[in-house]
Every structure is written in C-alpha cells, then in structure tokens.
Image (cartoon, rainbow, N blue to C red):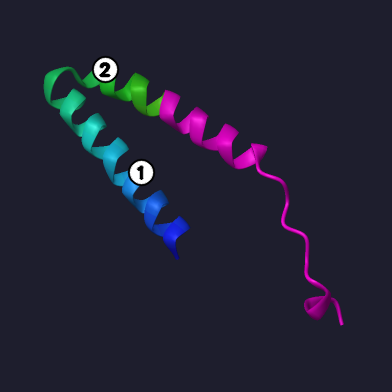
Amino acid sequence: MVRTAWHLLELLFVLAVLYGVALVYVPAALILGGLAGVVAVERALSRPLPTPSKERRS
C-alpha cells in the first residue's frame, strides 16, 4: 500500500513539473516527458520478476 502511494505521489510530482514547464515552453515539456517515459520503462525493466509463492503453485 505504501509503495503504491509513493508511486502515485511520484507520478503527480512529475506531471506537475511537466505542466509547469509546458506553461513556459511546450516543446521542452514534450522532450522532458519523453525522457521521463524512458526512465520509467528502464526502472520497470530493471526490477526482478516476481517469483510465485509455494501456496499459489499447488
């Protein structure tokens, strides 16, 4: 639950920063949004795959 809350808080922070940048210069916000997307995908792929527990295998 705490992990989900931190992910949601992080997402809201990034969206707020991108919105603020977009108010000044839209192309810069698009570039930063693309970079943030690449970082998010790299972070997701770097996590180890979850292993099924013994209870679920039976």
x and y percentages locating residue 3 in the rendered image: 47, 56
Q: Residue 16, position in %: x, y?
A: 22, 37
- Of residue 4 and residue 20, the one placed in the foreground of this image is 4
Residue that mark 2 sits on: 27
Q: Amino acid at mark 2?
A: Pro
Image position of 4 (left or right of 41): left
Q: Is residue 39 above or below residue 24?
A: below
Q: Amino acid at mark 1?
A: Glu
As drawn, 33 above or below 11? above
Distance Cα–Cα, label 2 vs label 1: 22 Å
Q: Give the residue displayed 36% in from the left and 52% down from the top.
A: 8
Q: Secondary structure under badge 1?
A: helix
Tell me which residue sits at (25%, 30%) in the image. 18
Circle nearer the N terminus (2, 1): 1
Magenta highlight range: 35-58
Q: Is residue 3 above or below residue 15?
A: below
Q: Residues within 10 Å of mark 1 (few under 14, many from 20)?
A: few
Foreground label between 2 and 1: 1
Q: Quadrant of residue 43?
A: top right
The picture places residue 9, in percent across and down from the top left corner, at 32, 49
Tell me the quadrant of the picture where the N terminus can be found. Answer: bottom left
Tag 2–tag 1 contact (CB < 8 Å): no
Left or right: 15 in relation to 7: left
| Tag 1 residue | 10
Q: Give coordinates of residue 17: x percent, y percent.
A: 24, 31
Q: Is residue 33 magenta?
A: no
Give the position of the C terminus as an image quadrant. Answer: bottom right
